[in-house]
Amino acid sequence: MTAAWSICAARGCFGSGLPVPGFRVAAVGFFCALGAATVAAEVVVNCVGLEAGPTRTVTRIVDGETVALDDGTELRLIGVLAPRAIDAGADPGTWPMETAAREALRGLVLGQSIELAFAGERVDRYRRQQAHAFLSGGEGRRWVQGHLLEHGFARAHTVAGNLACGQQLLAAERPAREARRGLWAEAAYQIREANKPTELLRYRTTFQIIEGKVVRVAEARGTIYLNFDRNWRQGFAVSLRRADRQLLGAHAGDLKGLEGRSVRVRGWIEQRGGPVIDLSSGGDIEVIGDAKAPAAMQRPPQASNDAIAK
């Protein structure tokens, strides 16, 4: 542990000087590294489909992915999923990763002006704005979502209606995941195996990342199924509407080409006999080691991100 991390661990702070009650010293030392020093190089987003929005000041942190703004609205940071107690079956308010993500976001944006950029649907069912957010200052323009992902404070995910920047979100997350940084150091966020459907059913209704080999691709009644077990009734599967086949990226026109390929899928696990992730409801799929462009949920090109630069 560096000197900066050790000092921060002893203080139990996130750059704010405030204690974090009940937080493990080891976890504090890890997550405080970000708040103890000026943030260095950040992920630069260069994706299509973003529409410039207003500039607002952050007045309050609601949770690790939601902030309150000076116009009285709340902003959901689209494309990232911060840790929650439910991820590990912990009691609300006691999960260290949830506390760490909230405090990291507080240290980054509280009292700061952020530029909003919309990726599709602007308001969710809770009447919160949903957008990408950018900080501008002496260190240049920084992508808030990319920052959280790069440092292991959130997982990448896209939802129907907000598919822009899908590949960029996954790319921002990758270094933290591969280095087991932040939440990725915790067993609760490990990548699950597709060939263990009984185990996967224990995680139904939760967001999971699953890796495995596609055994068979089938279509029935307007739905595409990627089956990971010859026993398709009980094994893990991925589903999507035929009209959403573009979610398979470079393989949208060659569904059978996915058979025998290893993929990484993320989304919420449902039970339909066996465990299922429905990409049409929200999620991502990446083809591991593919020579083609990786499959990832994204909207067809609309406009360059340069449109939102000032």
Image (cartoon, helix red, strand yellow):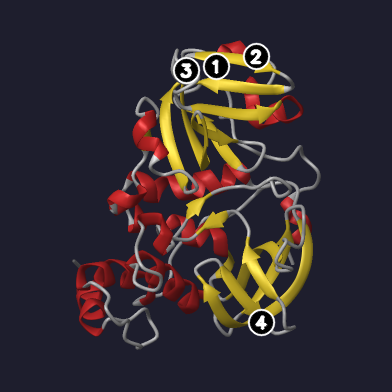
Amino acid at pointer 2:
Asp
Q: Mark 2 Cα within 10 Å, few/some/many (few <14, many 20+)?
A: few
> Is residue 123 visible from the viewing direction of this image?
yes
Sequence-wise first label, 3 or 4: 4
Give the residue number, with chain letter if any, for mark 1.
Answer: 258
| Residue 218 in picture, x, y percent from top left | 61, 14
Instruction: Tell whether label 1 touches label 3 (CB within 8 Å).
Output: yes
Instruction: State if disc 3 and disc 2 touch (CB < 8 Å).
Output: no
Q: Is residue 21 left or right of residue 110?
A: left
Between marks 4 and 2 in the image, the one whose residue lies nearer the viewer: 2
Q: Amino acid at mark 1?
A: Leu
Q: Amino acid at mark 3?
A: Arg
Residue position for label 3:
261
Q: Residue furthest front?
A: 273
Instruction: Mark 2 and mark 1 in contact? Answer it, CB < 8 Å.
Output: yes
Q: Residue at x 22, y 80 (%)?
A: 7
Residue 22 in the image: above or below residue 206: below
Q: How dense is the environment of label 4, judged by Cα within 10 Å: few (below 14), some, or many (20 and up)?
A: some
Please tell me the numbered disc located at residue 254.
2
**Quadrant of the snapshot with the C terminus:** bottom right
User: Is residue 42 at all visible to an observer of this figure?
Assistant: no
Describe the element under mark 3 as helix, strand or loop. loop
Which residue is denoted by mark 4 in the rendering?
A: 57
Q: Nearer the viewer, residue 95 or 250?
A: 95
Under circle 1, the secondary element is helix
Disc 2 is placed on an element classified as loop
The answer for how far apart the CA atoms under marks 2 and 1 are is 7 Å
The residue closer to the viewer here, 214 or 296, is 214
